[in-house]
Structure formats: C-alpha cells, structure tokens
Image (cartoon, rainbow, N blue to C red):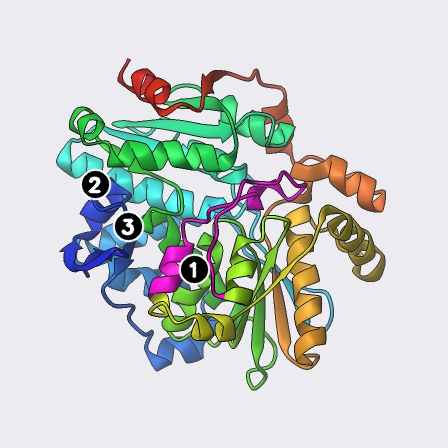
C-alpha cells in the first residue's frame, strides 16, 4: 500500500513515511493509492463480528506491508478496549455513541490507533519524534492521553485561548511529562496554520522530526472508518437504505465514512451537520470553497473556517461537485437551534445529546423532511459525552449531567499551559528553544 499527496499523485510514499511526515512535502494530504473492498463474506458477517474483529479486517490491507500480523492484532486490541454502542431512539433512528474512550470523545479512536503505530515505528527505527497538534477541543486531549509517557515522543498541543470548554482545557493542560500545551492567542484556524507552516518550513524540519496527530495525518483518519462498518452491521433491517449524520468541522469524521463506504459498507447517504461555520455547506450549495474566519459556537469542536479534509473529499470524487453534492447532504444550525434540539431530544426520547450530536440530529431531521426518507434507517453520530458540555446541556434541557469518575479527577488537576502569540516566528523560536 502506497500513499500519494492530494496535490501530486505521481509521487508515492510508504505508510511509515506518510505517518511520520504527517503532511506531504508539497503541502498536500496523504491518500491511499487504492481503497480495497472488503470481502463479501466480511460484509455479510458484520452483524456477528465484534468491533475489534471488524477493525482488524479493515486495518489489515493498509498495515500488512509494514507490520506483522501479530503487531496488527495487538495494536487493534490495545487501541480499542472500550465499547461502541448503537443506541435506538426509535425503531429506525439510532445514536452511535463514540464517547466511551479515555477522553470521552470520538477522537480517542484515531489518537489511540495512531499512538500505537507511532510507538511501533519509533521503537524499530530508534527515532525521536515531535508531534504537533492543532485542536479546537477534543482532538488535543485524545492525542495527549494516547501518547502520554510514550517513549521517544514529544507532544505539542496548540489550542485557541478562550475557545475551548473548561473541561476540554483541563484535559489538554494537566498531563505534563512529554505533553506540552500551547495556549494560542487566536482561533483554531490560527493553530492549524501554525502547524501547517511548521511542516512547510525546511529549516525547522532539518532540526526536528515533526509529524501531526490531527486528522490531516492518515493514521488518525483510517480508524474512523471502522465504527461506520460496526454501526451498519448492527442495524435491524438489511433491505432498507441507510443515512448517517456526521457533526462536521474539519471533515475528518466524514472522510472516514467515505472510506468505509468505498470499502463496501452499505451507506446510502451522508448527512453533514454544521454550525455557523458552514464553509462546506457553501461549497455543496454553490461549488465554491471560500474559507472564512471562525465564528465561536457552543459546538466548538466544529468551529473550523478552513477544513483541511475538504481536499481529501475533493480527491475522493475527482473534484466533481455534483458527485459530492449527491453523496453528502448538508445543513447548518445556529446555537439557538442546537439548544432547542437538546431540549426536544430529551423530552421526546429521554436521551441527552451534547451540542455536536444535537447538530447531527437536527441535520438528520432536515434530511428526512427534505428527502422524504422516513423509512430509511438513520444513525446520528454522538461524538462527545454530554458531561463535557454540562453547562450548555443544563441550560438547554434542565438536566444535570454527572461527571464520569475519570473526568471528575481531571477537573481537580492544575492547568499547565504556555500562552503564545499566533505569530509563526514566535512559535518557531519556541519550538527550537
């Protein structure tokens, strides 16, 4: 399996090169040369397979040239040691809970998978690695916990000052050891720009072995395909079309779903739920992609004005706007609608959504209404535990969400972060100091 850049298909790289470089030398994102289809036997047996068994089948084609079968099996077992329940709200509407990992967010899937891959690589090659991560909330904490105390790895987290929740900030800033948090005076897009500029800086890369653990890294992206197959395999009706609603910010989760579908998982429609940062919706509507300044919202992990994985989606569909528009239905909702959705979902289903899942639910409801998809099987991805947004939840539906024990423990720890200007020269000087 070789990987190419979204900016240049002629030059290819090994999986190890793609993981360790993070971003291609020309600034493009790595994509697999081919996305292999799962055997019919695997597709037919999804209902009987565990999540780990599905993950092994989907990961093997991408990893087997670089790692042994034993290493791959151990990686899957260690990375995914938590549940992925599909919760029914009605006979046709389901919630896929992706928050049962260590940091209570879906980012644990990609971060833990990548951490174990990187550990295998650095052990074999005796390399020291610096991982740069731009985060709008949950990515940073997932990466920090996944790589915490890993040998030969230094983790630098960049997050926008004042634009993450208190709980998210505590998860980002309280580990210490080989994890350093940089509180950037700017937006998530400023954090992402600093990371991208660092990867393009030849002088810096001569002095530091850099990679990224954002969803721009192919190792973070691949495992996000696994839970789509797991969810579809647990649906009750095998003869009805399936729609999956994805809360969408940097578009990595949506891209993972596209990989799953290309591998043969029966997903008939993707629904992209967006908040006020609706750059991707504007593209779906007009065919024009115009990055914008971020607008802060209560669904802050989706506060992205220049989503990186958009270019992977373009590559998937060979830059064909009509094909993208056909595969992905988009809708946007403001904070008032999001709060109302949390309230109404609790009243109607007795289920508490976090703000991101609430946007996904709203988008699914709009898709059903616009496309007359009442009889479809519908899955909404719930990407974070509602306790991470307990103030918003309580204001919206009056319910107090109890902190899981691991979260309560984190809140008692002391924040340790370095405040830094968004100027690249200052960031580079700090990295080299």
Marks 3/2: CA distance?
Answer: 22 Å
Image location (x, y in percent) of residue 67: 19, 52
Which secondary structure is most common in the magenta stretch?
loop
Marks 2/1: CA distance?
Answer: 25 Å
- SS for callout 3: loop
Residue for point 46% across, 16% down: 418
Q: For mark 3, does the 10 Å Cα neighbourhood hold few (<14), some (14 to 19), or many (20 or more) residues?
A: some
Residue 256 or residue 49, whichever sits in front: 256
Residue for point 68% across, 82% down: 375
Q: Which residue is mark 1?
A: 255
Image location (x, y in percent) of residue 43: 41, 77
Image location (x, y in percent) of residue 368: 68, 74
Q: Is residue 68 left or right of residue 218?
A: left
For residue 293, above or below residue 59: above
**What residue occupies the far top of the structure in this picture?**
433
Query: Based on the displayed image, in which of its 4 quarters is residue 63 positioned?
Result: bottom left
Give the magenta part as a residue range.
287-315
Q: Is residue 67 at least partly visible in the picture?
A: no
Q: Which residue is mark 2?
A: 121
Query: Based on the displayed image, in which of its 4 quarters is residue 370 positioned?
Result: bottom right
Q: Which residue is mark 3?
A: 28
């Amino acid at each position: 399996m070789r990987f190419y850049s979204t900016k240049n298909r002629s030059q290819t790289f090994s999986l190890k090169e793609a993981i360790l470089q993070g971003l291609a030398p020309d600034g493009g994102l790595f994509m697999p040369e081919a996305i292999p289809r799962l055997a019919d036997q695997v597709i037919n047996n999804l209902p009987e397979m565990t999540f780990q068994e599905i993950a092994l089948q989907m990961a093997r084609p991408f990893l087997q040239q670089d790692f042994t079968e034993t290493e791959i099996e151990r990686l899957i077992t260690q990375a995914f040691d938590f549940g992925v329940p599909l919760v029914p709200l009605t006979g046709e509407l389901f919630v896929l809970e992706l928050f049962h990992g260590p940091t209570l967010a879906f980012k644990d899937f990609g971060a833990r998978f990548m951490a174990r891959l990187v550990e295998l690589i650095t052990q074999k090659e005796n390399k020291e690695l610096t991982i740069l991560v731009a985060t709008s909330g949950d990515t940073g904490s997932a990466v920090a916990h996944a790589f915490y105390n890993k040998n030969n790895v230094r983790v630098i987290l960049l997050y926008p000052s004042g634009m993450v929740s208190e709980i998210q900030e505590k998860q980002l800033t309280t580990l210490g050891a080989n994890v350093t948090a940089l509180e950037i005076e700017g937006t998530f897009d400023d954090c992402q720009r600093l990371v991208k500029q660092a990867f393009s800086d030849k002088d810096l890369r001569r002095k530091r072995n850099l990679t990224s653990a954002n969803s721009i890294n192919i190792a973070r992206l691949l495992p996000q395909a696994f839970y789509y197959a797991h969810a579809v395999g647990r649906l009750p009706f095998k003869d009805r079309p399936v729609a999956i609603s994805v809360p969408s910010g940097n578009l990595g989760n949506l891209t993972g779903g596209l990989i799953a579908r290309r591998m043969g998982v029966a997903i008939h429609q993707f629904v992209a739920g967006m908040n006020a940062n609706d750059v991707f919706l504007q593209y779906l509507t007009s065919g024009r992609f115009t990055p914008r300044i971020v607008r802060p919202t209560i669904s802050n992990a989706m506060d992205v004005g220049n989503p990186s994985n958009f270019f992977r989606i373009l590559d998937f569909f060979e830059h064909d706007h009509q094909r993208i528009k056909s595969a992905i239905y988009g809708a946007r909702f403001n904070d008032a609608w999001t709060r109302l959705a949390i309230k109404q979902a609790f009243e109607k289903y007795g289920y508490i959504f976090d703000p991101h899942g609430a946007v996904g639910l709203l988008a699914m409801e709009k898709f059903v209404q616009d496309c007359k998809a009442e009889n479809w099987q519908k899955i909404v991805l719930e990407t974070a535990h509602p306790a991470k947004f307990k103030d918003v939840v309580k204001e919206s539906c009056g319910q107090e969400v109890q902190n899981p024990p691991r979260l309560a423990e984190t809140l008692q720890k002391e924040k340790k972060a370095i405040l830094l200007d968004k100027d690249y020269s200052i960031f580079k000087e700090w990295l080299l100091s």
